[in-house]
Image: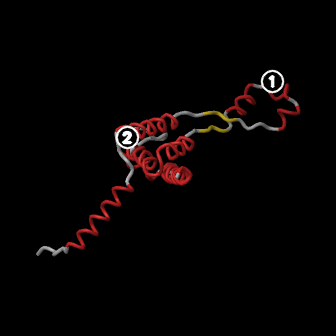
Amino acid sequence: MGKVVSLRDMDEKQEGYIKFLNNFPTCNLGSLTISLLCVLLLVIATFTIVPVGIYSPEILSEPEKYFSSINNVLLTLYSHLYSPQIPVAVFAGALLGPRLGTFSMVLYILLGLLGLPVFCNGAGLAYIYEPTFGFIIGFVLSAYCVGKIFDNKIK
């Protein structure tokens, strides 16, 4: 048996649908292209590692002794490695807004879960159990929050 829908209910449904469409981001070829470029930029940032050294007081007090050993120099240079993934996620949210920025981060995650090697330590559905997957989920939240902040500043 079918449900009887009154004309008033139909108007409310149409208004809700129109509100949904008005709040939905414009999804044209340009915005999709920029979203895909943000995903590509995030993949590049995943495999880009910048060495950031920790400098000890020994460097300032006696630099000639500290730098005499190549091991000390290499230990200083490679003591911390930095991956610029977070700035890319923030950039995507700022550039695309909350919805398309979140979409691009979700697309990055889906590509990795489908098996494309876009994550640093592998890919596939089993990556959900990796400890770094929570870090990747944070990209979605950061893109959304930054997009909302920038969206409110522009209006």
Residue 12, given in percent of the width and then of the height, sits at: 28, 69
Element marked by disc 1: loop
Q: Which mark is residue 155?
A: none
In this view, 42 is above or below 68: below
Dot 2 and dot 1 residues touching (CB under 8 Å) = no
Q: Residue at x 37, y 40 (%)?
A: 32
Considering depth in this image, is 138 or 112 the residue closer to the camera?
Answer: 138
Q: Amino acid at mark 2?
A: Leu
Task: Please rate how many residues cluster around mark 2, counting C-alpha atoms within 10 Å: few if below 14, some from 14 to 19, many from 20.
Answer: some
Inspect this view and state whether residue 138 appears: no
The quarter of the picture where the N terminus appears is: bottom left
The reply, left or right, for residue 47 in relation to residue 26 is: right
Nearer-the-camera pick, 154 or 56: 154
- Check the image and report above or below for 138 versus 14: above
Specify whether residue 98 is in view. Answer: yes
Density class for disc 1 (Cα within 10 Å; few <14, some 14-19, many ≥20) is few
Q: Is residue 148 above or below residue 55?
A: below
Q: Using the numbered discs, state the Cα–Cα distance from disc 2 to disc 1 in whole angstroms.
A: 53 Å
Q: Position of residue 25 (x, y in %)?
A: 39, 50
Name the residue that disc number 1 marks.
Answer: 68
Which residue is at 51% across, 34% downward? Answer: 47
Q: Going 49% across and 53% down the picture, which residue do you hit?
A: 144
Please state if 154 lies on the left or on the right of 58 as rendered.
Answer: left
Q: Nearer the viewer, residue 119 or 93?
A: 93
Q: Amino acid at mark 1?
A: Ser
- Count the labels in the image: 2
Nearer-the-camera pick, 75 or 102: 102
Give me the disc on residue 32.
Answer: 2
Percent coordinates x, y for residue 93 in the rendering: 50, 47
Mark 2 / mark 1, whichever is N-terminal: 2
Q: Secondary structure at mark 2?
A: helix
